[in-house]
Amino acid sequence: MEIREIHTEHKGTYGVRRINAELRGFGHTVNRKRVECLMRINRLEGRHLRRRKRSTVPDRLAPRAGPRPTRLSCRGVE
């Protein structure tokens, strides 16, 4: 199976879109959803190499806003 060969050749980093592009580069006409289905059946999945960007970094030295409310006080019944 060429999908598995491409996946192992690139050390498991290629996902559905890149494998689909590789297959099209080799002259195969194949749908992305078909590649996705075959990869799911064979339990192949690409690695997530990019780190997640943090938009907010907490300031550990900043004073707290105050005591957090307890569950009982949030209900308003008791």
Image (cartoon, grey):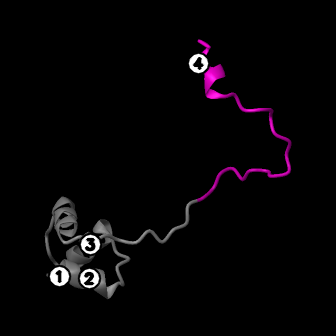
Query: Where on the picture, by quarter, is residue 19?
Result: bottom left
> How much space separates mark 3 and mark 1, taking CA atoms?
12 Å
Magenta stretch bounds: 53-78
Q: Are marks 3 and 1 in contact (CB under 8 Å)?
A: no
Q: Residues within 10 Å of mark 1 (few under 14, many from 20)?
A: few
Count the numbered circles shown. 4
Magenta span main SS: loop
The residue mark sitting in front, 3 or 1, is 3
Of marks 1 and 4, which one's residue comes earlier in the chain? Answer: 1
> How much space separates mark 4 and mark 3, taking CA atoms?
47 Å
Q: Is residue 59 above or below residue 38?
A: above
Locate residue 45, reporting x and y percent: 31, 70
Q: Is residue 26 visible?
A: no
Of marks 4 and 3, which one's residue comes earlier in the chain? Answer: 3
Q: Residues within 10 Å of mark 4 (few under 14, many from 20)?
A: few
Type of residue at label 3? Leu
Type of residue at label 1? Glu
Question: Looking at the image, which residue sits at the far front?
Answer: 78
Q: Which residue is mark 4?
A: 75
The residue mark sitting in front, 4 or 3, is 4
Query: Could you say which is closer to the camera, residue 10 or residue 71?
Result: 71
On the rendered structure, is 69 left or right of 77? right
Type of residue at label 2? Ile
Q: Is residue 56 above or below residue 40?
A: above
Question: Looking at the image, which residue sits at the far bottom?
Answer: 9
Q: Which mark is residue 44?
A: 3
Q: Residues within 10 Å of mark 2 (few under 14, many from 20)?
A: some
On the rendered structure, is 38 left or right of 66? left
Q: Is residue 61 magenta?
A: yes
Helix, strand or loop at disc 3? loop
Q: Which residue is mark 1?
A: 2
